Amino acid sequence: MKRMRVWGIGATAVAAIGMMLFVGWWQVDGPGSPEPMGQRPMPLTEMAFSLTDHEGNAVGPEALLGNPTMAFFGFTYCPDVCPTTLSDISSWLDALGDEAALLNVIFITVDPERDTVAAMAEYVSYFHPAIRGWTGPEEQIARAAEGFRDVFERVPTDGGDYTMNHTASVFLFDAEGQFVTTIDYHEARDFALPKIRRALQQEMEETT
Amino acid sequence: MKKIVSTGALLVLFSFAGASMPALADADDIVIDGAWARASIGMNRPGAAFMTIRNTSTEPVTLIGLSTPLAMMPAIHETRTSADGVSSMTPTDEIAIAPGESVALEPGGLHAMLMQLQEPMTEGETFPLTLVFEDGGEATVEVPILGFAARGPED
C-alpha cells in the first residue's frame, strides 16, 4: 500500500513535469508562441501611406523608389535616442561624402500631434541636410509604421506630458524598394557604414 | 524652498570660483567628469545632460535626485532598448555607486532628463546641475551646452 502511494506520487510528479514542459514549449516555441516582433519590413513597393515632408510636399513610399533608402522613426520631443541617432546618421552621411547624395534619408515622426510640418522643418535643420522629416495624420503614420514593422506606443510621464516608446532601428532599403537590413540603435559605426554601402552596392548591381 | 536656497548659494559659490572642471564637491568624494548637454530647440522639449560620476570615497554613495535652476523637473532616466529594437525611457529612483566605482550617464543609457525647461539651452552657455545624495551630500557641476547634434563631451 505504501509502495503504491509512492508510485502514485511519482507518476503524478512525472505527469506534472511533463505538462509544464509541454506548456513551456507551447508558449515559447510551439504554436502558442507570440508573433516574432523582429519581422522583416515590407518592400516599399507594397507599402501604402501618404505623409507630408518638412517642406510641405506630399510624399509616400513611391517617392523613395529609384534610390536606396535609410529610414528612422522617432519624435522631436525625444531627448536621447532620436538626437543621438540623427547625429549618428549625419556622421555616416558625412563619411559617405558624395555617395550620400544617392540615398533617400527620412525621419518619420511617431508623434504627429506635436511634430507638425514646421516642427519637423526646424528639427531636421540641425542635422545633415540630406535628412527629410515626414509627418502626417495619425492613421497614415500608423500605416507607415506597420509597413516598416516599427512599433510605437504613447506613454504618459509624471508632469502630465507624454513620451513615446518606439523602435529605434534604422531601416535600409535598396533602390528597388527591397528591404536590405537594419542598423540597430548604437551599433558601432564600423558596422553601420558597410551596411549602408551594401544598400548602395545593390543599386549599382541592379542598374548595371 | 530649502533646496532652491541652497542651489542659489551654490550658484554664487561657482560664480566666485569660476566654472572649473572637473568639479570637486561633497568633501572631494564625488568627482564629475566630462559633463555635457545638447542645445535645445526652445523650452517645450525636454533636455538631457550626460557625465561620469565617480565615487572616490571608501563608502558607497547613492544618488537620489537632481536639482537645477534650468529645469523644474530634473530626473535621472534610463533609456532601454529591447531585443526587438524598441527604445523606452524609465525614471530611475536611485543609483548606488560603490567605493572607487563610477557610473556613466551617456546617450542610450542613463541620463539627466531636464523636464520643464525654464529657459532654452543655448550652445556655448553652461548651467549648474546639483546631484543630491542619500546622505544629504550634494555635488554641483557646471554643465557646458554643446551643439544640438553633439555626440559626446569632445564635440
Image (tube, rainbow, N blue to C red):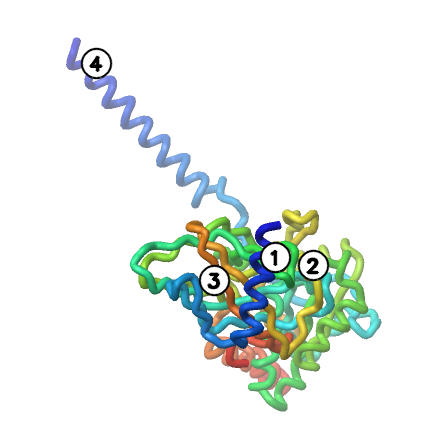
Give the spatial CA distance, label 2 vs label 3: 37 Å
Give the spatial CA distance, label 4 vs label 3: 68 Å
Mark 3 sits on what residue?
B139
Amino acid beneath label 2: Val
**Pointer 4 chain:** A
Secondary-structure class at tag 3: strand
Mark 1 sits on what residue?
A166
Q: Nearer the viewer, residue A177 or B110?
A: B110
Secondary-structure class at tag 2: loop
From the viewer's perspective, tell me whether residue B113 is left or right of residue A114. Answer: left
Residues flagged by tags 2 and 1 on a common chain: yes
Q: Alpha-carbon neighbours of circle 1 within 10 Å: few (<14), some, or many (≥20)?
A: many
Residues flagged by tags 2 and 4 on a common chain: yes
Mark 2 sits on what residue?
A110
Give the spatial CA distance, label 1 vs label 4: 56 Å
Q: Of the residues tagged 4 and 3, which is closer to the observer?
A: 3
Q: Where's the C terminus of chain A, which quadrant?
A: bottom right
Query: What numbered label is drawn on residue A5?
Result: 4
Q: Where's the N terminus of chain A, which quadrant?
A: top left
From the viewer's perspective, tell me whether residue A52 is left or right of residue B22. Answer: right
Amino acid beneath label 3: Ala
Q: Could you tell me residue B105's position as x and y percent? A: 48, 64
Q: Of the residues tagged 1 and 4, which is closer to the observer?
A: 1
Secondary-structure class at tag 4: helix
Q: Alpha-carbon neighbours of circle 2 within 10 Å: few (<14), some, or many (≥20)?
A: many
- Name above or below for residue A132 compared with residue A137: below
Residue ID at (68%, 61%): B117
Precedes in sequence: disc 2 or disc 4: 4
Amino acid beneath label 1: His
- Residue that sits furthest to the bottom in the current view: A98
